[in-house]
Image: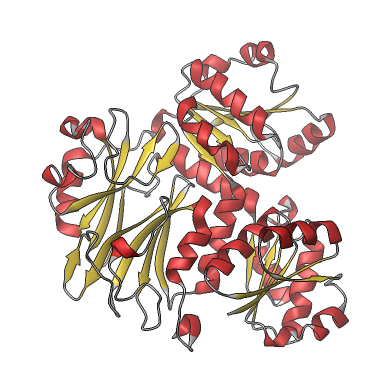
Amino acid sequence: MKIAIVGAGKLGTKVTEALLGGAHSVTVVDNDEEVLAKLSSQVDVMTILANAKEVTVLTEMDISSYDFILTVTNSDDKNLVIASIAKKLGCPVAIARVTGPEHLNQFDFLKETFHIDAIVNPDLAIALEIYKYLIEKYTLSNGIFTSGKIAVIEMAVSKMPSLIGVSMREVNKHLQNMLVLAISRSGKVIIPHGDQKIQKDDELYVVGEKAPILALDKKVHIKGKYTDLQRVMIIGGGKTGLYLAKQLSEFGIAVKIIELSKERCHYLATHLDDVMILHGDGTDIALLESENLDEMDAFVTTTGYDEENLLLALMAKKRNIEDVIAKISRESYYNLIESMGVDMVLNPVDITASHILRFVQGGKKVLSSQLIQGQAEIVEILAGRHMAILNTPLKEMNLPEGALIAAIHRGGNVLIPDGNAEIVEGDRVLIICLLSELSALEALLKDSGPLGIFG
């Protein structure tokens, strides 16, 4: 497909990289020459140095020849206007990034008014994932993800101690005709392979045919603990902190936000009900202690500084707070997560890019998708006749470490594949991939035939 992206920031770059992995034609527009130069040094993509708010720019691009336009600049107003102009000029589908809290309850109105098709909000997306984790405890809603005859269950390895120390090569001896497709370990989601062994505190995601998986669920399922959640401290009163505090407060949780900016504290106080707003430095441990840090059920760091978020999260975890969650934007820090033992680490750019990609692909190719702890995605696809992964043994696909083809639903049968298995046209295929490797996932989903994505 032919896709225009306006804005070459973190989100625009992430989506561009992923789309190029799927062999789409991408044009990136930005009015910052330095930003475009940086992007061009990372990926081979067409760039245009211009202000896309000018109708002449979109006209000269022949925007009507594009299938999608995605506007992801740092200005809500600019994104809405450009998307609206592009639609008026004939671009079939327009998606705009809108982050302002004032727009939170009027997305439908904005879409109708500006004639755009979808709105994405990274801060809201990450707040929803944190809320879902804290309130439901299960990233698969009730612990089970089902589609057709395939099901995935989330389970604590402590409920089946015989799995401790078992490698991926041996796991079928304990879980017949099933596969461990992901491990959650100390806040990090791992796609396991070969000799990797299960550890005692792991959370496992197991895939198989629906009936055996549901039977396993009855043996190992732990009901959600959300009724135990009473007190949450949030460090950072930005948009993510605001959205999360609002959701938790409405659920009946006692929430404290600590924010450094006095002006921002006034804003939060006027936009949040039943939330305690504290003006202070979130890195001041004495302040946190005076606000009963050790009595908190959950501690969430959402400041604009990754280093600060990670260090505070580590401090909270060492004080035995049950749930510690950190917002992290730099993928280079992900290798630190497992050793730190934080319960959950989320990247808003990765999550939003995933949402955008699923919207772009539509239901003709991706039948369903489900995020796993905001770090990985389970995707069910329908294998079309032009897909590049057809009729090739899995062991010859050179799958990245962060991706795994977990199950194949063919006719009335469910196949848990080994390296010799092949995907054929018409299969429903379950794939899991780390969000940090979205471009690798898109490469798996790309079409090689003349009809492209809808072939």
Q: State which quadrant residue 288 falls in.
A: top right
- From the viewer's perspective, is 198 left or right of 353? left
Front-lying residue, 230 or 133: 133
- From the viewer's perspective, is 185 left or right of 231? left
Counting from the top left corner in percent of width and height, residue 155 is at: 27, 40
The answer to whether one can see residue 252 in this image is: no
Q: State which quadrant residue 103 falls in.
A: bottom right
Front-lying residue, 247 or 259: 259
Residue depicted at x 23% and y 66%: 421
Rendered position, 351 above or below 294: below
Q: Tell me, what colour scheme is on the image?
A: secondary structure
Q: State which quadrant residue 90 falls in.
A: bottom right
Rendered position, 211 above or below 180: below
Number of on-image labels:
0
- From the viewer's perspective, is 229 left or right of 29? left
Counting from the top left corner in percent of width and height, residue 352 is at: 59, 56
- From the viewer's perspective, is 60 left or right of 444? right
Rendered position, 59 above or below 349: below
The answer to whether one can see residue 426 in this image is: yes
Residue depicted at x 86% and y 70%: 51
Residue depicted at x 44% and y 86%: 455
Residue depicted at x 19% and y 65%: 414
Q: Quadrant of the N terminus?
A: bottom right
Counting from the top left corner in percent of width and height, residue 385 is at: 36, 83
